[in-house]
Image: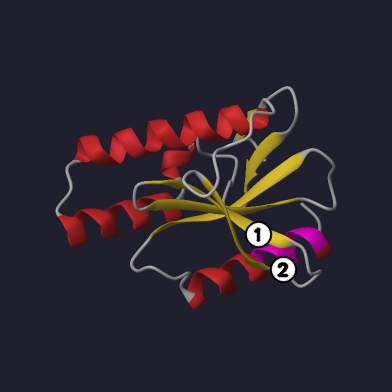
Amino acid sequence: MKLSIKGSRLTVRFVEDDDSMENWNELPSWKEAAAIWQEKDRCKDTQIEKAYVQLHIKMQRMANGARLRNPDHFNTEADLPDKKKFYAIKQGKMRAYGWFSNAEKGVFIISHFACKKGRKLAPADTRRVVDNWEAIERGGL
């Protein structure tokens, strides 16, 4: 995995990384979430760019050991198959869903990005995180 955010406490990695991308805003789920946000709310490219920058700052702070303010920036979302939790790093309507890896100490893995459509976690997002968790934690990175 080429894309990562390394800090003094942990490394943030991305499931969708195929080693050809330079920045995580090139990931398919980020592009999809940004397109949904633009279509739904008619937001400008500058809002998408601001969300990208703010999420990147939050991930870098988390990698360096800072606690993100709950529930405004970092929220527990649902259970994984091993009864641990997965989380959302939040910026506006954009979410980065991920979990702390069992397979690799000191790694937080971002499953995917999504545009929050309602108040509750979408079942499709839960399913996607669980599927990615099973592939990574049981199948290897």
Residue furthest to the bottom: 123
Secondary structure mostly seen in the magenta stretch? helix
Whether residue 31 sits left or right of residue 3 in the image: it is: left
Assess whether mark 2 and mark 1 are in contact (beta carbons under 8 angstroms). Answer: yes
Which secondary structure lies at badge 1? strand
Residue furthest to the top: 8
Whole-percent x, y for residue 19 in the image:
60, 40
Whole-percent x, y for residue 83 in the image:
79, 69
Which secondary structure lies at badge 2? loop
Q: Residue at x 81, y 69 (%)?
A: 82
Q: For residue 50, which quarter of the picture?
A: top left
The residue wearing badge 1 is 86
Q: Give the residues in magenta.
A: 132-137
- 71 drawn magenta: no
Give how far apart the Cα atoms at labels 1 and 2 are.
6 Å
Q: Which residue is drawn at 31% across and 51% down?
A: 34
**Mark 1 packing: few (<14 Cα in 10 Å), some, or many (20+)?**
many
**Mark 2 packing: few (<14 Cα in 10 Å), some, or many (20+)?**
some
Whether residue 114 sits left or right of residue 86 in the image: it is: left
The residue wearing badge 2 is 80
The residue under label 1 is which amino acid type?
Answer: Phe
Mark 1 or 2, nearer chain start = 2
The residue under label 2 is which amino acid type?
Answer: Leu
Whole-percent x, y for residue 53 in the image:
39, 31
The answer to whether residue 39 is above or below residue 127 is: above
Q: For residue 59, which quarter of the picture?
A: top right
Q: Which colour scheme is used?
A: secondary structure
Q: Residue at x 52, y 56 (%)?
A: 112
